[in-house]
Image (cartoon, rainbow, N blue to C red):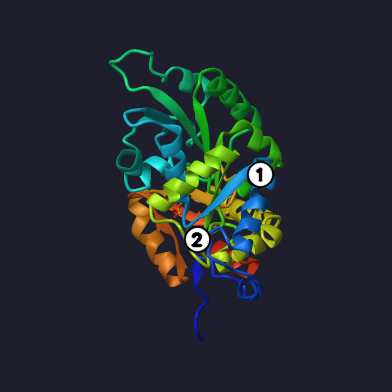
Amino acid sequence: MKKIQIDLRSDTITLPTPEMLKYMFNAKVGDDVWEEDETVKALENQLASIFGKESALFCPSGTMTNQIAIRLHTQIGDELVCDKLSHIYNYEGGGIASNSGVSARLLSGECGRITVDQIHQNINPDDVHFPRTSLVCLENTVNKGGGVCYDYSQIQDISTYCHSNSLALHLDGARIFNALIAKNDSAKNYGKLFDSISVCLSKGLGAPVGSVLIGDLNFIKNAKRVRKSLGGGMRQVGYLAAAGQYALDNHITRLSDDHDRAKKIGDKLNTLSIVNNLRPVETNIVLFDVHESHLNRFKKLLNNYCIKASFMGDQTVRFVTHLDFCDKKLSIVLNALEELN
Ligand SMILES: *Cc1c(COP(=O)(O)O)cnc(C)c1O
């Protein structure tokens, strides 16, 4: 009998469900570069309204939505402020520099969460020697920080500070719905605090592709031009937007199941002496270090149970729970980990 394969490398590996595929097939589409795709417009309107913003733009990836936002909030030669674990800095191919000609001031937050005081200490004075600080970028949840989320009040303080100091504030909300579910916060309140928000449909929400950039009318109008220049203008893309619509309607509340399963894995890891530095398990990511001398044993065990994890650095392991990870698979993982006791 074929062994059950358990893939916990990322929440991007999920396959569209049969229901999602059916919904995609039935989408009404048109040429979206000519603004004739009803399904894309409906998805954009839905997300703008969820966050209480004026407008939104469907893009192929979260990298593109973030990079468009950075381009629009800065001038060449400026500096942005973000945590050193940020996706925009680590995983977007150096796009901050190559797309926008901007430098990054990297802060050391707590698992990727930065504070208003840290930001305040890293804004350059208005002096020709220094790059002009024009943008602050937050990430919520923080991928490389183990999926931790901000408290709403922390972001409120940062937003107030940014807006009274002429700084734009962008949210890399690739997993914002995980944060909203975990903290029981409202999307509309988030919309009020940020100038722009990027949301991924292809992570925990389970769509095959897509990210949406959200902001005010003029910002999104300009974003459309940048998207075109980056090669992101798409034609009958309503088939993919339909997957996003289906995900928004059906896959948000279930994120709490992913969080519960991640928590159970975290609780088990906490009992193992070979595990160090387990980051707080607040959402669907479980990030921890395995003691060097046990690394081979750990990898062999995963292999025996057909469990895939991602390795982020020599000893750091990441499990991500998602739509295709069920209770049956969870119990296999928990049993496997028990062997390390
Ligand atoms: C996945 C991700 C993105 C976007 O990645 P794409 O693969 O380009 O869609 C952005 N930020 C974070 C935190 C992510 O995890």
Position in image of residue 278 (x %, y %): 50, 44
Q: Nearer the viewer, residue 165 or 324?
A: 165
Task: Name the residue furthest front.
Answer: 34
12 versus 313 height, above or below:
below
Q: Nearer the viewer, residue 16 or 74?
A: 74
Label 2 residue near ligand 1, CB within 8 Å? yes
Within 10 Å of disc 2 (Cα), the crowding (few <14, some 14-19, many 20+) is many
Q: Is residue 151 left or right of residue 237?
A: right
Distance Cα–Cα, label 2 vs label 1:
19 Å
Position in image of residue 71 (x %, y %): 41, 38
87 versus 341 height, above or below:
above
Task: Name the residue furthest bottom.
Answer: 1
Position in image of residue 331 (x %, y %): 61, 66
Instruction: Tell me if I can see residue 61 in this picture.
Output: yes
Dot 2 amino acid type: Thr
- Going 59% across and 40% down the picture, which residue do you hit? 217
Residue under numbered circle 1: 180
Instruction: Tell me if I can see residue 275 in this picture.
Output: no
Within 10 Å of disc 1 (Cα), the crowding (few <14, some 14-19, many 20+) is many
- Going 57% across and 55% down the picture, which residue do you hit? 265
Position in image of residue 50 (x %, y %): 69, 46
Quarter assignment of residue 242: bottom right
- Going 52% across and 31% down the picture, which residue do you hit? 169
Dot 1 amino acid type: Leu
Q: Is residue 27 left or right of residue 162?
A: right
- Going 31% across and 29% down the picture, which residue do you hit? 77
Residue under numbered circle 2: 12
Q: Nearer the viewer, residue 338 or 330?
A: 330
Q: Disc 2 or 1, which lies upstream in sequence?
A: 2
Element type where label 1 sits in the image: helix
17 versus 257 height, above or below:
below
